[in-house]
Image (cartoon, helix red, strand yellow):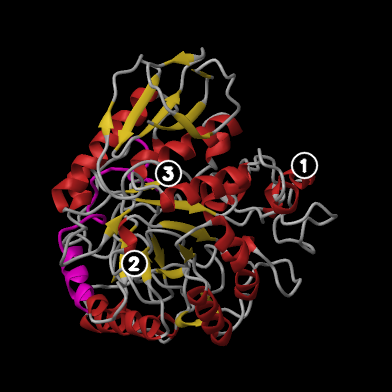
């Protein structure tokens, strides 16, 4: 890949959850060959890059976020040769590839842990009061009486980043994948590697200490020392051609703290989870957008926008239906910066809320009853029996036949074709991508922005049709318009002045 080293500043990145995306060998689990076979679909969708959730060697205690070998592909997903072929084909189609990096913890099946190299993990003679994000204590005792720290599942021991050998290992892992041609990294739990000196108790007994996507200040997250790590990584990224980048998954206590992860000597981007957690209301969206743009300005980097991912309920369900989800998507794709999509949202998939308990695999469900499996159900590709899968690892609702890529392919009103149209416009319209926005005066339930030159975006989050004094040609709408100049509830319109 050649060209713009700043491609990531306004890129549309599509998250592939490999187990659930596409299955090439028919074993019921998605794989890298399946992703490779669907690159044409992704090219037609119009994305700039794909982000692959972990495909590394793993016992799959946490969906692959428990890595046993950071330099190989788990046989369930294929081989390194499959990965190399995927990179080559993606690049040939102009699609960049970002991979997940999991530096806070490894699998307990990692050779270091198996060999008893305790100085590379966090072992103590007695536990403190820290809790696992997945529920229960964050410490597990081993046979000789010592305890090891795992901020997530017991099968995910935290690495000791005070040990220079751990740091050297991850610098080498970065180079391994950069040498294979990856264009960037999504850094998992980017705020977690450094713990407060002495591992002090949290001392809180009223409810969980910290949660996924939480903003609590605790001694095991967002310690200042994590920034030293990223200052070691940035020169490595910069030493490769083509604009290699890294984006942080960091849950921190304030936008100001998040901004510290981004800069010319640290990471390129940090996920903006506030937008994902906003309510479907004009005021909620505007508050988050204004704050996000302000913080991005502080560090001179564009913000990121995301509505769904592998850890949260799909936004069709979260926002109260497909019409609202489509409206939120058109708002997101019109904002300055980059956008991250989650596989299946372009089909309008809802959360699957009725999976049988015995089929759920999420360790958060097994430990405290909260499941992320419902957003990880495999994608429906065809309308035929099986929906493009043979014995999928999670059952696909039969009703998804109507939402399959095949069913939506030629329907001009389908969600798939709305995404395609929006991404086509975003790529060619001079007002979209980077830049700034101007707020227009609107009623309380309506949000309107202007992107220069001449693009106006209006979202009606109210219960009644909205009328605005904005003349222009409708370029795209998230739902049908009545033709009288009004915008129905739960609808976003892109207008060209």
Question: Label 1 vs label 3: CA separation?
Answer: 28 Å
Q: Of the numbered discs in the image, which one, if any, rests on residue 333? A: 3
At label 3, counting other C-alpha atoms closer than 10 Å, the crowd grade (few under 14, some 14-19, many 20 or more) is many
Q: Residue visible at 21% across and 58% down? A: 262
Question: Label 1 vs label 2: CA separation?
Answer: 39 Å
Please state which of residues 304 and 469 is positioned toward the viewer in this rendering. Answer: 469
Earlier sequence position, callout 1 versus callout 2? 2
Residue named by callout 2 = 104
- Write the start and end of the magenta stretch as one range: 206-235
Question: Label 3 vs label 2: CA separation?
Answer: 31 Å
Residue 298 placement (x, y as % from top left)? 14, 48
Which of discs 3 and 2 lies nearer the camera? The answer is: 3
Residue 442 placement (x, y as % from top left)? 33, 17
Residue 223 placement (x, y as % from top left)? 19, 57
Q: Is residue 211 visible?
A: yes
Query: In the image, is residue 210 part of the stretch drawn in magenta?
Result: yes
Quadrant the C terminus occupies: top left
At label 2, counting other C-alpha atoms closer than 10 Å, the crowd grade (few under 14, some 14-19, many 20 or more) is many
Please state which of residues 322 and 53 is positioned toward the viewer in this rendering. Answer: 322
């Amino acid at each position: 890949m050649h060209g713009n080293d700043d491609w990531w500043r306004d890129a549309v990145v599509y998250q592939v959850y490999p187990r659930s995306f596409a299955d090439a060998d028919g074993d019921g689990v998605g794989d890298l060959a399946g992703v490779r076979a669907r690159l044409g679909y992704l090219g037609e969708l119009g994305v700039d890059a794909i982000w692959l959730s972990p495909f590394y060697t793993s016992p799959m205690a946490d969906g692959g976020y428990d890595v046993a070998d950071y330099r190989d592909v788990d046989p369930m997903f294929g081989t390194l040769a499959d990965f190399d072929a995927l990179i080559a084909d993606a690049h040939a189609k102009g699609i960049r590839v970002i991979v997940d990096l999991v530096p806070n913890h490894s699998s307990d099946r990692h050779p270091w842990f198996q060999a008893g190299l305790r100085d590379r993990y966090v072992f103590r003679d007695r536990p403190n009061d820290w809790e696992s994000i997945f529920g229960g204590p964050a410490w597990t005792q081993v046979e000789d009486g010592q305890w090891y720290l795992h901020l997530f599942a017991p099968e995910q021991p935290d690495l000791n980043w005070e040990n220079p050998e751990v740091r050297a290992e991850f610098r080498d892992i970065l180079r391994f994948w950069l040498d294979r041609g990856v264009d960037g990294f999504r850094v998992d739990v980017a705020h977690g590697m450094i713990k407060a000196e002495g591992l002090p108790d949290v001392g809180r007994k009223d409810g969980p200490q910290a949660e996924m996507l939480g903003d609590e200040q605790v001694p095991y997250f967002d310690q200042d020392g994590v920034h030293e790590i990223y200052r070691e990584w940035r020169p490595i990224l910069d030493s490769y051609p083509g604009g290699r980048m890294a984006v942080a998954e960091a849950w921190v206590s304030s936008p100001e703290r998040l901004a510290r992860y981004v800069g010319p000597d640290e990471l390129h981007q940090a996920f903006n989870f506030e937008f994902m957690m906003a309510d479907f209301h004009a005021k909620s969206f505007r508050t988050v957008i204004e704050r996000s743009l302000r913080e991005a300005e502080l560090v001179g980097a564009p913000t990121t926008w995301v509505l769904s991912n592998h850890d949260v309920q799909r936004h069709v369900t979260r926002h109260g239906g497909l019409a609202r989800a489509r409206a939120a998507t058109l708002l997101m794709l019109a904002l300055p910066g980059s956008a991250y999509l989650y596989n299946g949202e372009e089909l309008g998939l809802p959360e699957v809320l009725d999976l049988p308990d015995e089929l759920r695999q999420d360790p958060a469900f097994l430990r405290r009853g909260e499941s992320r499996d419902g957003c990880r159900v495999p994608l429906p590709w065809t309308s035929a029996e099986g929906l493009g899968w043979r014995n999928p690892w999670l059952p696909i609702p039969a009703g998804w036949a109507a939402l399959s890529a095949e069913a939506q392919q030629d329907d001009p009103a389908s969600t798939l074709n709305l995404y395609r149209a929006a991404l086509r416009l975003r790529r060619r319209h001079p007002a979209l991508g980077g830049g700034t926005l101007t707020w227009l005066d609107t009623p309380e339930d309506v949000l309107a922005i202007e992107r220069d030159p001449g693009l106006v975006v209006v979202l009606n989050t109210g219960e009644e049709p909205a009328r605005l004094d904005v003349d222009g040609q409708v370029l795209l709408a998230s739902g049908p318009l009545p033709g009288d100049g009004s915008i129905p509830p739960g609808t976003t319109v892109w207008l060209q002045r």
